[in-house]
Amino acid sequence: MQYPKRLPGGSVQGHGIGNDAAVRVGPLAGLPNILRELGWDPEPLFVSAGFKPKQFENPDHEVSFVAASRLLASCVAVTGCQHLGLLLGERVEPSSLGVAGFMLRSAPSVQAALNGLVRHLDLHDQGGAATLVTRGDTTFLGYVIHQAGVSATDQIHDMSMAVACKILHGLCGDGWSPTGVFLSHRMPSNIARYKEVFHAPLHFDAEQSAVAFASRWLDHPLPGSDPLLHRHLEREADDLHRRRKTDQAGRLRRLLRASLPSGGCNVSDIARQLGMHERTLNRRLRAEDTTFRQELEQTRYEVAQQLLSDTTMPLGQIADCLTYADATAFSRAFKRWSGVTPTAWRSRIIAPE
């Protein structure tokens, strides 16, 4: 099965615009015990990353997304466990995702549950976003990182896909199984653990991490559906969104990050998703001293860095992901952004001096 050419993009690496996002520690709560099981004392690892293990005992506690990613990278480096993200993902319960997780079971159908997850995951995770794309008989539940400067992107994507499979199993029952799992990083030297976790065809070097499954499951009714509870949780989530102060450029970046390879990155489409006319969007962006074009180019640069550093994807395919006509046009743009060609940049990142 081939991954669609046009789907939301992968994770962000390198410099970027915007403040450091926050994430609830719920899904990371199992990290201290995992480290102990691997034979390591978590205390010094956490302290060196600016944390204390006790901070991870309260699932609602918020930490820096970037700092948490550096903690993951440090744990992988020290333990040598290249599938740490999978170990974490296997221990995550949907309730660890806060309101977005609690809403899953009360929804009337799988479609409604996943739509709610996509809409409200930012209440748990401000550094990434869930995506849901249907292409005929196949639907893709994915995850993208839009926070810049993130470490251990491979571990974060592995964990997210393990969680996605767990969510779908919980919603659909034992009859559900993925038709494919796509991971936006290179193939590890040992994929035995991946096979054990996913039990599905694995596709590395993907433009986005996503779990593929038969679209017919979207209509599957949920036996635990509770319309009154679901409406209450929806109102609570909407209220939390209203109280959160987010700059217009920040909202735009998240949408661009999720929409870029889908081709829906023109100003009219994005303005419609933001619930406003494009003139209004442009006016608000000018008030924040930026433009739609500047934000789109920055997003393209960040996606390009991720794909160049984390995958072996050819330049022509990266150009297609970024909606450039060909590899030459992409190379010109990348050199304008970074001062070097994408080939030279990739060589520098993979084999630093």
Image (cartoon, rainbow, N blue to C red):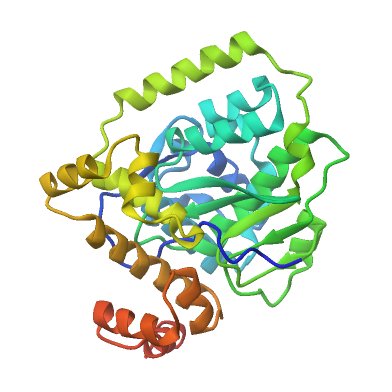
Q: Nearer the viewer, residue 331 or 347?
A: 331
Q: Nearer the viewer, residue 38 or 113?
A: 113
Picture quadrant of residue 69: bottom left
Picture quadrant of residue 228: top right
- Name the residue at 24% across, 42% down: 248
Picture quadrant of residue 220: top right
Q: Is residue 36 visible?
A: no
- Name the residue at 70% across, 68% down: 203
- Name the residue at 46% across, 29% down: 60
| Residue that lies at the very extreme toward the right in this rendered image | 175
Q: Where does the image place residue 155, in percent across and percent down from the top left?
A: 56, 60
Q: Where does the image place residue 336, in percent across and percent down from the top left?
A: 25, 81
Q: Relative to 37, is 115 on the left or the right?
A: left
- Where, quadrant-wise, is the C terminus in this rendering? bottom left
Q: Where does the image place residue 292, in percent across and percent down from the top left?
A: 25, 55
- Name the residue at 29% across, 66% down: 297
Q: Is residue 59 above or below residue 204?
A: above
Query: How many callouts does the rendering have?
Result: 0
- Where, quadrant-wise, is the N terminus in this rendering? bottom right
Q: Is residue 268 visible?
A: yes
Q: Is residue 94 above or below residue 231?
A: below
Q: Relative to 120, is 50 on the left or the right?
A: left
Q: Where does the image place residue 346, in percent across and percent down from the top left?
A: 43, 84
